[in-house]
Amino acid sequence: MKKNNIALLSFFAAVTFSSHCVFAAMTPVGLWKTIDEDTNKAKSYVRITQKNGVLSGKVETILNPAKQNDICSKCDDELKDQPILGMTIITDVKAQDDGVWGDGEILDPTNGKTYTLQLTPQDEGKKLEVRGYIGFFYRNQYWLKVE
């Protein structure tokens, strides 16, 4: 009976450890194709990077050639009338529990609003749930991993 208990405990420890390692390896770092939640069409590529445990994300490519030179006309402060291409839209995101990244912000350059941000890698890191909050209201987007 003791051998069975030890084997069972060893199995659960191995599963817990290996799933934790896989889970911990999933981060939002990389290049992501943003998908418009209304049209379900790809809009841009955003590169998320990590420095000193903090994530930020920059618009690397705008897929619609007609919008390549768009500016953030509805933004405030130093971002007002700045080009969206090359703009940092994700700031100050940090790892939280259970593979979720949050406590940062995301800017929607189309409306100039800044949202509290939560990022959750899904599908073994191939998909990213991007949830922006203002108060109790939120909206989700799902981005796809490019690299």
Image (cartoon, rainbow, N blue to C red):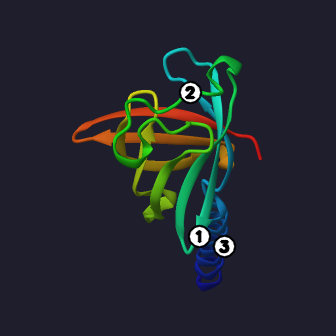
Residue 124 vs residue 117, the one in the foreground:
117
Quick one: quadrant of the N terminus?
bottom right
Q: Report the residue at 62% width, 38% height from top.
A: 85
Residue type, mark 3 in image? Ala
Q: How many marks?
A: 3
Of 68 and 137, nearer the camera is 68
Residue 146 spot, x, y in % from top left: 75, 41
Of pointers 1 and 2, the one earlier in the residue sequence? 1
- Neighbour tally class for label 2: few under 14, some 14-19, many 20 plus, Cα within 10 Å: some
| Nearest to the observer: residue 2 or residue 102 | 102
Residue 79 in which image quadrant: top left
User: What residue is shown at x 64% (from left), y 58% (from top)?
Assistant: 26
Tell me, for residue 64, which label it has, or none.
Answer: none
Distance from label 1 to label 2 (Cα)? 28 Å
- The residue pinned by badge 3 equals 14
**In front: 142, or 107?**
107
Asked if 105 appears above or below 66 in the picture, the reply is below
Query: Residue most toward the bottom?
Result: 2
Upstream in sequence: badge 2 or badge 3: 3
The amino acid beneath tag 2 is Asp
**In the structure shown, which secondary structural element does the residue marked by tag 3 occupy?**
helix
Mark 3 burial class by Cα count in 10 Å: few <14, some 14-19, many 20+: few
Q: Is residue 118 left or right of residue 124?
A: left
**Residue 68: image location, x then y, percent:** 66, 27
The residue that label 2 is drawn on is 70
Q: Secondary structure at mark 2?
A: loop
Displayed quadrant of residue 112: top left
Which residue is tagged 1? 51
Q: Secondary structure at mark 1?
A: strand
